[in-house]
Amino acid sequence: MIKKITLAILLVYATQMHLNAQTIDSTLAKYALDFPQEKIHLHFDKGVYNPGDIIWYKAYVMSGLDLSDCSKNFYVDWFDDKGNLLKHVVSPMFESSARGQFELPAAYLGKFVHAKAYTQWMLNFDTTFLFQKDIRIERTAVVETTPAATPVPPSKNKNGKTPPPVPTPTPAATPAKSSTPKASIHFFPEGGELLNEITGRIAFLVNNEYGLPVNAVGALKNNKGEFIDSFTTEHDGMGSFTIQPDSTQPYTATWVDEYGVSHTNTLPLGKSSGVALEVQSTKGKAIFFVNRTKEVVAAQKTLIVIAHMHQHEVYKSKINLNERVSAIGEIPTKDLPTGILQVTLFDADYHPLAERVVFVNNYQFLFTPQVRFTKTSVEKRAKNTIEIEVNDSILSNMSVAVTDGGLLTDGGSNIVSDLLLSSDIKGYIHNPSYYFASKADSVIHHLDLVMLTHGWRKFNWKEVAAAKLPSITFPKETEFMQLKGSIFGSLNKSSMQNQTIFLIVQGKDSSKQSLFLPVDKAGNFLQKGLVFYDTVYVYYQLTGDKKLTDRVEISFQTGLIPPATNSYYRNHPSPLLWTANTQDTLLLERSRMFFTEKEKIAKRLAANELEEVVVKGKVKKPLDVLDEKYASGLFSGGNSKQFDVANDPFSAGAIDVFSYLQGRVAGLQIVNNGADVSLSWRGNTPDLFLDEMKVDADQLKNIPMTDVAYVKVFPPPFFGATGGGAGGAISVYTRKGSDVKPTPGKGLNFKQLGGYTVYKEFFQPDYENQPNTYATDARTTLYWNPYVLVYGKNRTFQVSFYNNDITKKFRVVIEGVNTEGKLTRVEKIVE
């Protein structure tokens, strides 16, 4: 009888193990499929700004190894250095990217501004993984500096040994006439815990209250004060040592930081029972070591190792420690992509016991465009030309910045370090781009120290084992901005039956669009694809019973979300508050010199020396005036073929807009057979717009040419189209009676709505045709293009720009991603 009961218990236990295994596997697969984690990088045009500057940026959004398809809208909240919200910027996304700008107030006195970037989908998960960056702001004032405090050497220990001398601070870390920073040390046992009987590895991180790394040396001592071993930081405040803990004899670490201050800290205690995990990443594999204490519970004698990357399980094995206390295994990594590999050790009941992350780098994450300088000159206002070529037919989406080569740069992070490292790691990583700058063993070892001393994206394994999925508050934004609304008040089924609402959407430029939208039984209505910038007035009237409009309340939304928060809280001061007080470099002085030149211009303007200094008015071409009058947002400016239809005598002989355009745009094929029309451009069908509202060919064909004022034809791809615009676009604008019109909704109710943030086109002078654009040219950013697109047969892009009056060398930075998820980062200096 006893044997039967025991057998029954074992069968239940085995069945439960199998069910837990199935649950975890299926839940992980569900996470990967339905709950992808987005990651962000922002490419800024330069690394340091002056008050009054425009901060230009390009956002790249990925999910795991792929371009993200979770979001169509992108948000950046800008805060001052006190944590107060300055501006909420919303941009549409195209090809998993977005562009934007933030204009610094001319009177801004802060030392930095803080950018928090995110998508709506990202707000469902751990918000510590939102993109966060402090951007340095410099004025003319020069900070006085003094040498650092003299380090105090540590005294000899009882064994007569002296730890290594305290490292002196580097010039970049020399404090100014402010109080000495306070350093602290943090210990991280590998795998999570120490065990009494087993030698374990402890990593440590020393930093100051600004989060910056601090050099230190120290000694480990037992509870009697006897010297056990010495330790020292190896790279950026990080290091490690091994120790066999004894909970009856706690150890202490006595150490001295680079400021000469002595400290004493107690090491974590060991546990008397448990299992330890150690992982070593080598070429082509990750070797794991599992050790248990002699006495453990039964469930800890049968163990499971699961490794996953980008939410996908890549390895799983079972370990039997019934007859032994240790085991070794290998996780093949040579075919894995570059990124963080998370290794978790479970007991037989799938309770997590230890966890470790390692970085796998197979160096297959890059594509490298060829950059040719076909015309270079650093003379004043000289023209320069660069060709960028990608030897691949797939779409490469890049951004290009050309700045003064003597400016301070933010070389600490880039698209590679942000998307492959920082976006998956919690906490501040100092100079993350360093870990991708070399294949040296020392760099690989230093990166492993980052893995040991920082948190990461973790699963709640208890919830995974219970098949509990994340609670979603914010759905994926798979549509651009919408116009949607709800009707509240005295409603009944009869009043809403076959009901429609008439809307007039009017922009600041008096442009307007009329809509008739059906209203469902619940009183809701929706118009997708209505994209507008800045603010509009929406005039509305319910059709049928006009009195019904006054008896109900109608709310309107665009689907765009407000700022995530109106203030920004950080658990430690910005590192820039410390580095801003360090010794000034020549690069920083150059930034201040440019600001001084700009201030001189402003003062001369204030003295009414208009003819000498002010930016002289650029004579606008008639088509430019027309474009400003009719086009907005992504439809304004840009690479397009423009037609002034209202003043073109040939338009009078055209039957419709298609016959007018036939044969006038290279590459655009139009077949117009009476009632039917077909269009093709590079194998795809162009998108059609009427007053920037998407329409079909029949609607556009029925517009009389006498009503058409202006036509723009965009070559593919056109990012104003919801589907990516692979066939380009044709945008037709109907005539405006005058720039100022009477209110179209006279007698109608109205509400004001905010849309996408207005994007300004980057202005660069054309000194060949307009040599007097600037009297004094002190631009620090000479060229900025957030969308350099090459694909198919069009694999080369030409960049042209003019020098200013000061610069003697240029810095060219190219970042981007292709449709396979590979990244690029190219930086060149031209002198």
Image (cartoon, rainbow, N blue to C red):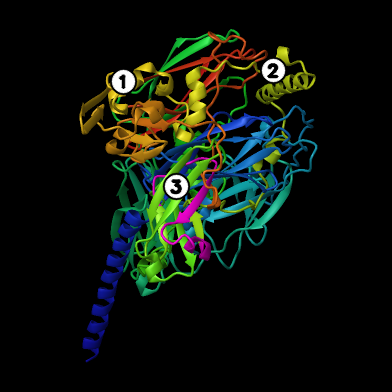
What distance separates the C-alpha of mark 1 from that of mark 2? 46 Å
Q: Viewer-proximal residue, 29 or 266?
A: 29
For the point 34% across and 56% down, the residue is 34
Residue 827 within the magenta-colored segment of the rendering: no
Label 2's element? loop
- Residue segment shown in magenta: 527-553
Q: Viewer-proximal residue, 38 or 252?
A: 38
> Residue at label 1?
653
Type of amino acid under label 2: Val
For the point 67% across and 48% down, the residue is 83
- Density class for disc 1 (Cα within 10 Å; few <14, some 14-19, many ≥20) is few
Q: Viewer-proximal residue, 826 or 778?
A: 778
Q: Can the viewer see residue 444?
A: no
3 or 2: tag closer to the N-terminus = 3
- Density class for disc 2 (Cα within 10 Å; few <14, some 14-19, many ≥20) is some
Type of amino acid under label 3: Met
Type of amino acid under label 1: Gly
Instruction: Tell whether 533 sits left or right of 154.
Output: left
Label 1 or label 2, whichever lies nearer to me, is 1
> Residue at label 2?
614
User: Which mark is drawn over residue 48?
Assistant: none
How far across and down, in percent of the image, does residue 171 sit?
Answer: 69, 30
1 or 2: tag closer to the N-terminus = 2
> Residue at label 3?
481
What distance separates the C-alpha of mark 3 from that of mark 1? 38 Å
Q: Can the viewer see residue 576?
A: yes
Q: Viewer-proximal residue, 528 or 236?
A: 528
How far across and down, in percent of the image, does residue 67 sit?
Answer: 37, 41
Q: Within the image, what quadrant is residue 267 found in? A: bottom right
Q: Residue furthest left?
A: 673
Label 3's element? loop
